[in-house]
Amino acid sequence: MRKVIDYVKENKKIIIVVLLIVILLGAVYIIDKGKKKNSKVTATDTEKSSTEIKLCGILSNIEGVGSTDVMITENEGEILGVVIVCEGANSIMTRSNILNAVSTALNIDKKIIAIYSMTV
């Protein structure tokens, strides 16, 4: 036991540096894990069309919408349907704003637009 105490006293600075490095690495791991957990991704940007990406950007800037995901179904250039999943879809006013924005942006009938609330 005496040898351990003497070793600690002689190498106190090294032990402190090693402990700080371990704590720092642990903190970085926890923070990185938290970021990955909070970022839900249903499709990568390469799988999304440029129109879907632009629409996500526009909608997420509307007050109350929050995080947004968009899927546009097309057949030979004709839009058959649009699905929007967002955090603010529980509000009737936000849903109305989304419906009007998407209908105007894509020049489509509001009947083919579906809006759903995102699970948080």
Image (cartoon, rainbow, N blue to C red):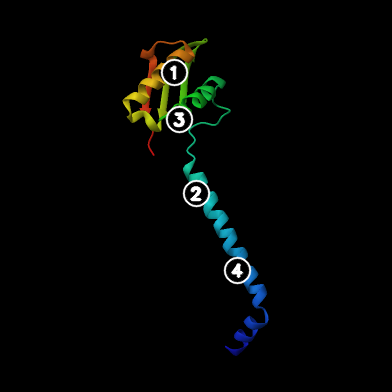
Q: Earlier in the sequence, mark 3 or mark 2?
A: 2
Pinpoint residue 26: horizontal percent, then vertical percent.
55, 59
44 up-or-down from 12: above or below: above
Mark number, residue 68: 3
Instruction: Quote the CA–CA distance across marks 1 and 3.
Output: 14 Å
Q: Mark 1 against mark 2, which lies toward the viewer?
A: 1
Q: Mark 1 against mark 3, which lies toward the viewer?
A: 1
What residue is shown at x 43% (from left), y 19% (from top)? Answer: 82
Q: Nearer the viewer, residue 42 or 65?
A: 65
Instruction: Quote the CA–CA distance across marks 3 and 2.
Output: 20 Å
Pinpoint residue 20: horizontal percent, then vertical percent.
61, 66
Mark number, residue 101: 1
Say whether residue 15 is left or right of residue 62.
right
Say whether residue 21 is left or right of residue 101.
right
Secondary structure under the numbered disc 3 in the rendered image: strand
Q: Earlier in the sequence, mark 4 or mark 1?
A: 4
Q: Which of 120 and 90 is in front in this view?
A: 90
Q: What residue type is labelled 3?
A: Thr
88 up-or-down from 96: above or below: below
Is the Cβ of the residue at disc 4 closer than 8 Å to that at disc 2? no
> Can you name the residue that lies furthest to the front here?
63
Instruction: Quote the CA–CA distance across marks 3 and 4.
Output: 42 Å
